[in-house]
């Protein structure tokens, strides 16, 4: 296992060739890195689950009173899913500030500056999904430590006021997959951070005779991020229909454990809390719940098209 960020961006867990087999991720192969690694006073600790040229999945922890600086940005969209605690997300260009609680999500469009703060008295833990790339090279951006729109800011430091953008509130249907919470190109043009509360998640049913609930926080042309909810009980073992994705996918264990059965290889992975599973493109699998409680996993699917 490598703990150097420069060694794992774009190829973690490391493989010499294309990742063609499922990879289980636990404390033996989850990497660590610090952002920023050039200013440790204002940094956060990150755990790298997966990084390819199409999707990166990591988690970050910020202690009470902490925040990271300078602001960050990426050459792809970034989705936050808050696993524990409450995070305050800040856009230094617009002055926008959003409190995001456990179970809620954020969509940060490509190129949008952002900083994360913890104003609570407990550690905040966030799953971050970036697609297609987390960085252009192996270096963090260092060119963004400029003026910020904070209380009492100097208007002369900014060319114009922030444009107001309020997306319509709606209960989505399966027809909105690919443009949730809004079309990706529109949010990237506005460069505004979008808050996905529980009420704003797109809920869809997967399967007729074996229904599983899917809650999409994000579904656009770069990525899909959401949750599988596999109930317990019933007259037979509760399990999903066969699921398959055209691109790479990742599962993070939440409540469970959740059994993941690979149809072609007949392998079974028991997905435990905060452990992960990489699923290669076009790999069919099923989710099974052998426990007495509802099983839950967060999914991240690469959707980027060349």
Image (spheres, grey):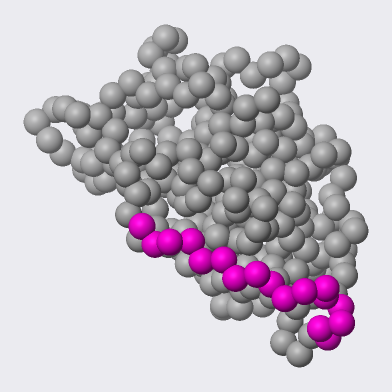
Please, which residue is most extreme toward the left here?
235
- Please provide the residue range marked out in magenta: 154-170
Q: Quadrant of residue 253?
A: top left
Could you tell me residue 75's position as x and y percent? 75, 44
Per the picture, the main secondary structure of the magenta-coloured stretch is loop
Q: Is residue 236 left or right of residue 4?
A: left
Where does the C terminus fall, quadrant-wise? top right
* Residue at (86% x, 38% y) in the render: 137
Residue at 43 percent across and 61 percent down: it is: 168
Tell which of 73 and 70 is nearer to you.
73
Of all residues, the one furthest to the bottom in this rendering is 152
Residue at horizontal 38 percent and vertical 24 percent from the top: 243
Q: In the rendered view of the protein, which quadrant contains the N terminus? A: top right
Position of residue 166 relative to residue 264, above or below, is: below
Is the residue 292 above or below the residue 107 in the image? above
195 relative position to 88: left or right: left
Task: Count the numbered circles shown.
Answer: 0
The one nearer the camera, 153 or 55, is 153
| Residue 245 x/y as whole percent | 47, 24
Q: Position of residue 80 (x, y in %)?
A: 57, 54
Asked whether the viewer can see residue 123, the reply is: no
Residue 303's place in the image compared with 293, above or below, is above
**In the image: residue 55, left or right of residue 36:** left
- Camera-nearest residue between 248 and 218: 218
Which residue appears at 23% of the width and 41% of the height? 231
Considering depth in this image, is 5 or 244 the residue closer to the camera? Answer: 244
Residue 305 visible within the image = yes
Which residue of the protein is positioned furthest toward the top in this rendering?
264
Is residue 112 inside the magenta stretch?
no
Q: Position of residue 156 (x, y in %)?
A: 87, 82
Question: Residue 92 is drawn in which quadrant?
Answer: bottom right
């Amino acid at each position: 296992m490598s703990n150097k960020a420069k060694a794992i961006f774009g190829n973690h867990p490391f493989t010499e060739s294309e990742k063609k087999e499922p990879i289980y991720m636990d404390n033996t192969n989850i990497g660590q890195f610090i952002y920023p690694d050039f200013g440790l006073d204002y940094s956060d600790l990150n755990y790298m689950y997966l990084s390819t040229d199409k999707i990166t999945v990591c988690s970050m922890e910020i202690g009470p009173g902490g925040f990271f600086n300078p602001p960050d940005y990426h050459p792809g969209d970034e989705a936050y899913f808050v696993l524990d605690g409450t995070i305050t997300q800040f856009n230094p260009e617009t002055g926008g500030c959003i409190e995001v609680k456990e179970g809620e999500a954020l969509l940060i469009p490509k190129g949008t500056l952002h900083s994360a703060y913890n104003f609570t008295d407990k550690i905040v833990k966030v799953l971050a999904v970036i697609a297609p790339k987390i960085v252009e090279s192996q270096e963090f951006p260092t060119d963004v430590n400029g003026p910020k729109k904070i209380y009492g800011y100097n208007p002369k430091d900014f060319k114009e006021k922030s444009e107001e953008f309020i997306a319509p509130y709606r209960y989505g249907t399966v027809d909105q997959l690919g443009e949730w919470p809004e079309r990706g190109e529109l949010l990237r043009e506005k460069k505004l951070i979008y808050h996905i509360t529980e009420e704003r998640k797109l809920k869809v049913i997967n399967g007729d005779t074996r229904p599983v609930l899917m809650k999409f926080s994000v579904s656009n042309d770069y990525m899909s991020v959401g949750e599988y909810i596999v109930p317990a009980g019933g007259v037979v073992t509760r399990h999903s229909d066969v699921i398959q994705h055209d691109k790479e996918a990742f599962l993070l264990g939440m409540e469970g454990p959740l059994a993941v059965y690979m149809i072609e290889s007949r392998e079974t992975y028991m997905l435990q809390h905060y452990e992960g599973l990489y699923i290669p493109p076009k790999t069919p699998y099923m989710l099974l719940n052998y426990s007495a409680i509802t099983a839950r996993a967060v999914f991240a699917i690469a959707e980027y098209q060349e």
